[in-house]
Each structure stands twice: as C-alpha cells, then as structure tokens.
Amino acid sequence: MPTNLFDLSGKIALVTGASRGIGEEIAGLLAEQGAHVIVSSRKIDGCQAVADAITAAGNSAEAFACHVGNMDDISAIFAHIKASHGKLDILVNNAATNPYFGHILDTDLGAYNKTVEVNIRGYFFMSIEAGKLMREQGSGVIVNTASVNALQPGPMQGIYSISKAAVVSMTRSFAKECGPLGIRVNALLPGLTKTKFAGALFTNDDIYQTAIQGIPMGRHAEPAEMAGTVLYLVSDASSYTNGECIVVDGGLTI
C-alpha cells in the first residue's frame, strides 16, 4: 500500500460534465493529485477553459467534447482514449440533465426522454465502454454522480429523481458484475449544492428555505465540497470500497 493513498500519478481519468460546477472541481482535484484528466462536456469551449486552467496550474489535462446522450459522441471519445492513451483508469460519470421542474403529472415525453437518455442511458453506456477498457487492463474505477433525490425524491423533480434512483441501482449492478474483473464502481450522492445546474432550487425561495431547514448543518454545499469524496473513491484509499453510494448532504437524509 503506497504511503500517499491519494496519489493518482500515471492515471488517466475521464470526467464528464466537467466544464463547470461539481465536475470542474473534481477534474481539478484529480489533476492536482497527478492524474491526466480528460475534461469532457457537451461544448468544447467550456471544456477547454477548464483544461487550460488545470495546465496553467502545472497539472495535466486535455479537453474533449462529448454529449453522453449521443451514442456517436460516446463512441468518438472512447476511440480517442484508445488511440491517444491506450487505457482508462478512472471514469467519473458526472454529466446530467434536469430539463423539467414542475409537477410530475405534467411531465411531457420530451423532458422524460432527455432525462433518461443522459442520466440513465448515458451513464450506462459510458460505463460499458470504460469497463471494456478496464477489463483489458484488469483494473479501474468508475464513480457515478447520483443525488440525494435518489433516496428522497425532490419536490417538482420527479423524473430527475427517478433517473438518479436508477443510477444508484446501476452502480450496484456494475459493482457486482465488474468487481471480479478488478473494477470498482461507486457513487456520490450530493445534497443541496450551489451550481448553475441546481439553479431552480436557489431561485425558488420557498423550496430553498424548506431544504435548508432540513439540513442539520444549516447551509448548502459548495461544489468543491463534493470533490474530496470522489478523490477518495478513485484512489487507493478506497481499495476495498465497491458498490457504495456515499451521501454528502450535510445531514439532510438523517
């Protein structure tokens, strides 16, 4: 066991949804610990800005646009990884969408399909492609960003909450079948975190105040407060952790 359990030197890491918010913080922290990070999101400009900031800090990163709701994009990014790096040690499935905020009975087919395509199908096939590479090398780690909504459905967030519950089940299913291959699969379940993605929760004062009142720590989280748990899950510090869904919510779900 190495002395520095969090050392990621020599590791190739792919972080999706990394152009801002929690994904950006994860990408930066993994790079600080020595990983070469592939910064991915739908639009290349945002990815490049994050990759440039990482390299400016003396660490290693590159940008590659990938919309995980698009199967051709998934094929393209893994073709690039195979050609450029020949391996993948870490996948962080962090890209997600939540296009609908309203009563569950008013959910339309478009919002349903978009949520499922990104949050379920995207995570599933990204994990499959990463898992195939990891199987060849006999090792690897996958971390899925789910949500406390998987455990306690969020108000006006029905299909999103359902999709995140699916991510929890997906995490456990991959962990069970891929563990024998040397691949660990775990999940992060963030609580209320101040990101652009969660903007609807912060602009609706009634929902925000209700949420804060239910958090023992009495505040929301900042994106950087999620990255440390992911670092633990992708590092040797968690070498015997598999199939776990770690809640980071200030005590909301107690």
Image (cartoon, grey):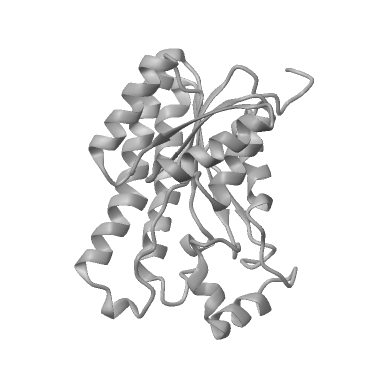
Give the residue displayed 28% in from the left and 51% down from the top. 117
Residue lying furthest bottom: 206
Q: Is residue 251 left or right of residue 160?
A: right
Q: Is residue 105 visible?
A: yes
Vertical position of residue 155 compared to residue 54: above or below: below
The image shows residue 24 at horizontal and vertical percentages of 57, 45
Work out which quarter of the rendered image holds the C terminus and state it: bottom right
Residue that sits furthest to the right in the current view: 3
- When asked about the image quadrant of residue 129, the answer is top left
Q: Residue at x 37, y 62 (%)?
A: 162
Taking the image as shown, residue 78 lies to the left or right of residue 54, namely left
With 16 as the anchor, is 23 left or right in this view? Answer: right
> In the image, is residue 227 above or below residue 202?
above
- Up the image or down, 193 lies above or below 35; here it is below
Relative to 233, 109 lies left or right:
left
Residue in front for this viewpoint, 254 or 33: 33
* Viewer can see residue 93: no
Q: Quadrant of the N terminus?
A: top right
**Number of numbered discs visible in the structure rendering:** 0
Within the image, what quadrant is residue 116 found in? bottom left
Q: Is residue 77 above or below residue 69?
A: above
The residue closer to the viewer here, 41 or 120, is 41
| The one of 193 and 46 positioned closer to us in this rendering | 46
Q: Quadrant of residue 229?
A: top right
x, y percent for residue 21: 56, 53
